Amino acid sequence: MTDRYAVAGNPVAHSRSPAIHQQFAQQTGQALDYGRLLCPLDAFKATLQAFADGGARGCNITVPFKFEAFEMATRRTPRAALAQAANTLRFDAQADGGWLADNTDGVGLVRDITVNAGVALSGQRVLLLGAGGASAGVLGPLIEARPAEIVLANRSLDKAQALVDRHADWAAEHGVRLTARALDNAGQAYDVFINGTAASLSGSGVPVGPGVLRPGTLALDMMYGPAAQPFLHWAHEHHAVARDGLGMLVEQAAESFALWRGIRPDTAPVLAALRAQIDTPSPLQNKNPV
Ligand code: NDP
């Protein structure tokens, strides 16, 4: 039987992960099948358990189930443990049948910013919006990149504060000033602005004012495809360098693939092919297509 994987979430129809993993499989000569698993909001765990019981080898987890997925694993990588959220599960890693949880979102985001976009994070002022599964996953790796400051702003301030508290030692160890703020007090003129909220996904607009930008700020929305367009236009209008989440998506997928299959695919051709399919040009992407 072909090894089976999927991306589990709600919604999940927009996900490009199946196309990405099929390209990775072709590139590395691996035989696998990767689909989409739409999970009812009140039955995520049962749906995922049935998928694993049916012989699947692993899955990616997307909005809004990363915390629940983390809880279902019996072993966690250190970066997943810091995030307390998982975007990758491996069902076949342990002899006792327990699941391994990892979180590859952060390493994917940092790689997209520093390698694909060529923007250094070290010494910079960074605003990260959102305190859901995605932001939980990226905060630790962002800290490791040693910016001068990270402000974490969220609609529910208590969630941002909890995330900041959990990362306080990690931030101190890396010399990073880390604070939580409300959205209406998010601060001004950052070097890097990352939208890790689900606002673009739900079409509700950019949840902060343009004062968070200065000319040349890297403004990155983790969303991609048509739903990211309003954010990209907003950033462009305010003289920022706009970037969507496609590069992050491909980079985090490559890390998941490596965890499952023991081989890391080359991301550049896959990202270039996706970029050509999805018509989401942005100033930075035009300058540097991957
Ligand atoms: P969660 O559901 O776990 O968290 C959602 C977050 O967004 C919360 O902080 C929530 O605030 C906030 N939020 C939702 N709607 C609004 C709004 N209208 N205004 C302001 N804040 C809002 O989702 P995830 O963290 O898993 O995912 C977030 C986004 O990132 C999704 O769009 C997802 O597709 C994308 N993503 C992209 C990846 C990529 O590889 N490109 C990887 C991971 C995620 P509150 O806490 O107050 O509810």
Image (spheres, helix red, strand yellow):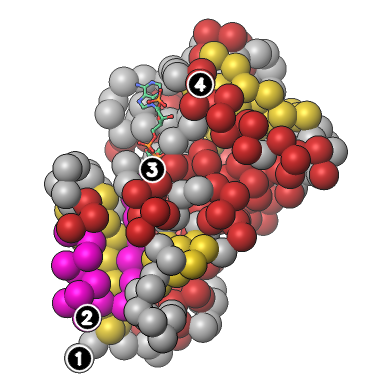
* Precedes in sequence: disc 3 or disc 4: 4
Which amino acid type corresponds to the residue marked 1 in the rendered image? Met
Which amino acid type corresponds to the residue marked 2 in the rendered image? Gly
Residue 285 in percent (x, y) is at: 53, 45
Question: In the image, which disc is placed on residue 158?
Answer: 4
Q: Which of marks 3 and 4 is in front?
A: 4
Which amino acid type corresponds to the residue marked 4 in the rendered image? Asp
* Precedes in sequence: disc 2 or disc 1: 1
* Tag 1 residue: 1
Observer-nearest of 245 and 90: 90
Tell me if residue 49 is in the magenta stretch: yes
> Would the CB of label 3 be found within 8 Å of ligand 1?
yes
* Tag 3 residue: 224
Residues under numbered marks 1 and 4 in contact, where contact means CB atoms less than 8 Å apart: no
Q: What range is drawn magenta here?
A: 47-63
- Report the quarter where the C terminus lies: bottom right
Farthest residue to the top: give it. Answer: 184
